[in-house]
Image: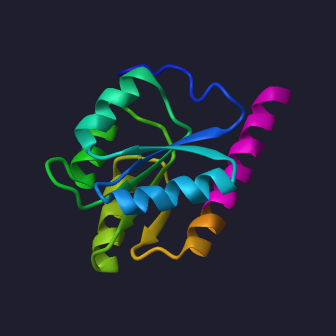
Amino acid sequence: MNTYSDSASNNNHLIYAIDDDLLLGDIFSYVGEATGFDVEIVPSGKVLKNKLRKKRPDLLVMDIVMPNMDGIELINWFAEVECKLPVVLMSGYDSSYLNAAAKLAAAQKINVVGSLQKPIAIETLEKLFRKLKLELLTESSLVSYS
């Protein structure tokens, strides 16, 4: 099992957004900043593997369909390294594809905390990020005071 270093050092939680669509990455950065997250855009699964060796984010948001290493391969790799990070799955393909990926992830005990169907409305993304931020803050406070 790999070990990962601590997450973002400032007060914001860190999201790695894994997607080969750079425009969508800009949207993630904008909405993340507005909701108290630092967002790092990760263009591929291969780059993600390298980044996770250096710094652990608080949340992964990943596209299912990407060139070279797709989300299904990443889900399998997460299971292999026993990754417990919360994951949001997203896809521009038919919703049945996203549902199948979520079922695979659940079967492999991947911590899927949400899904997004592309195209993504900014309001939808903002609502999801605010919900996840609240959950992360609640989780942190429970750990701090237990």
**Majority SS type along the magenta span:** helix
Relative depth, front residue between 90 and 105: 90
Residue 4 percent coordinates (x, y): 45, 22
**Is residue 146 in view?**
no
Left or right: 26 in relation to 62: right
Residue 138 percent coordinates (x, y): 77, 44
Q: In which quarter of the image is residue 142?
A: top right
Left or right: 95 in relation to 140: left
At 68% across and 60% down in the image, what residue appears?
Answer: 131
Left or right: 91 in relation to 144: left
In the depicted structure, whether residue 63 falls above or below residue 37: below
Looking at the figure, which quarter contains the N terminus?
Answer: top left
Colour scheme: rainbow
Q: In which quarter of the image is residue 116?
A: bottom left
Q: What stretch is highlighted in magenta?
A: 129-146
Q: In which quarter of the image is residue 128?
A: bottom right
At 36% across and 21% down in the image, what residue appears?
Answer: 2
**Is residue 47 in view?**
yes
